[in-house]
Image: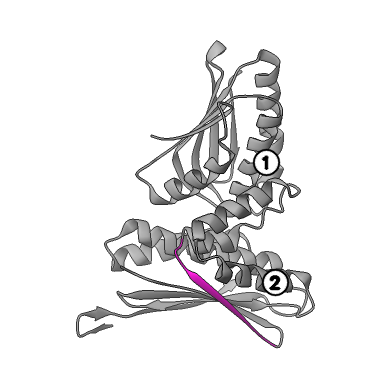
């Protein structure tokens, strides 16, 4: 599966790495009022693909310049959905960017086992 | 204005109630702060504070009457900054009570990270689109204390912080 999402200032590119799963790279900015309206259908397809193939997903945020709290809200829903379906998710953020460090380190409250890892890169 | 080694600054803007204006102003505020301070991370935090407060004003304000603008005021010096957003509100709106409850809860929870983590866990149990993380993020990532006041149909939310 190769696909991408371009919505306003946000670009999300997907790379299919075969048995290694999907790599999802967030770029630009996510500042929509209701980001879930665009993100939910896009990620529903990716999550379904991971579940069918029994592979995991790697999400990279190092090239994301900004996201609003509504986007964090959607990420929480996505983490919950993937955990519920037993899909492994690894999140990478830019440790040198304080706003990313603070946001993603707080999301570690969901990182209870191997299903979710959040790593500073 | 420069005065005895201190840099005072002030921005006041009426902003049309159009969602796209939030990002325009947030980026402009960031550029403004970068021109004043060396600490880029702190500048980004304050710009994000302005962004989150403007988002709340547009989402939960009462825009049914003639009001078309919110007001953003940012002021401070090299030791402190205040970000204030003023918007129309329905005093009977449940969102106002929720805002005041959140601020009271934040005051009672001095560890801003613990507060944000608690809100993140609560958001997981809410319906999509109802995370309500903005104010807690302002306290945690922005390092701000937040106050709110209501005068008639006008809500003022003030986030303030000091610099080390």
The numbered mark at residue B27 is none
Residue drawn at (52%, 63%), measured in percent from left and top? B138
In which image quadrant can residue B22 be found?
Answer: bottom right
Residue identified by numbered label 1: A77
- Give whichever of A14, A114 is nearer the camera: A114
- Other residues around mark 1 within 10 Å, as few (<14) / some (14–19) / many (≥20): many
The answer to whether B20 appears left or right of B75 in the picture is right
- Give whichever of A79, B32 is nearer the camera: A79
Q: Mark 1 lies on which chain?
A: A
Visible in this render: residue B68?
Answer: yes
Q: Position of residue A118 (x, y in %)?
A: 49, 35
Note whether B7 is above or below B36 in the view shown.
below
Which one is closest to the eye, mark 1 or mark 2? 1
Label 1 and label 2: CA atoms lie apart by 26 Å
Residue identified by numbered label 2: B61
The answer to whether B96 appears left or right of B75 in the picture is right
Note whether A87 is above or below A104 in the view shown.
above
Q: Position of residue A10 (x, y in %)?
A: 54, 42
Residue B147 is one of the magenta-drawn residues: yes
Q: Position of residue B19 (x, y in %)?
A: 62, 61
In which image quadrant can residue A51 be found?
Answer: top right
Numbered range of the magenta stretch: B142-151
């Amino acid at each position: 599966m190769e696909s991408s999402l371009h919505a306003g200032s946000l670009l999300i590119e997907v790379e299919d790495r075969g048995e290694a799963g999907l790599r999802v790279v967030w770029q630009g900015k996510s500042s929509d009022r209701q980001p879930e309206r665009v993100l939910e259908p896009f990620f529903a397809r990716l999550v379904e693909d991971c579940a069918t193939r029994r592979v995991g997903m790697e999400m990279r945020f190092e090239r994301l310049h900004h996201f609003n709290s509504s986007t964090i809200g959607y990420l929480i829903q996505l983490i919950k959905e993937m955990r519920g379906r037993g899909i492994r998710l690894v999140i990478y953020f830019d440790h040198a960017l304080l706003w990313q460090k603070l946001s993603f380190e707080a999301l570690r409250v969901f990182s209870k086992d191997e299903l979710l890892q959040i790593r500073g890169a | 204005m420069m005065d005895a080694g201190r840099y005072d600054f002030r921005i006041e803007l009426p902003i049309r109630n159009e969602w796209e204006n939030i990002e325009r102003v947030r980026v402009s505020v960031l550029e403004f702060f970068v021109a004043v301070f060396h600490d880029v991370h702190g500048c980004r935090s304050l710009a994000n504070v302005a962004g989150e407060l403007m988002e709340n004003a547009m989402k939960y304000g009462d825009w049914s009457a003639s009001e078309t603008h919110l007001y953003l005021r940012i002021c401070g010096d090299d030791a402190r900054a205040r970000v204030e957003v003023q918007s129309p509100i329905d005093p009977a709106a449940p969102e106002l009570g929720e805002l005041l409850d959140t601020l009271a809860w934040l005051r009672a929870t001095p560890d801003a990270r613990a507060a944000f983590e608690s809100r993140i866990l609560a958001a997981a149990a809410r319906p999509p689109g109802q995370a309500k993380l903005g104010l807690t993020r302002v306290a945690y990532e922005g390092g701000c204390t937040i106050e709110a006041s209501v005068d008639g149909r006008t809500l003022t939310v003030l986030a303030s912080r000091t610099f080390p």
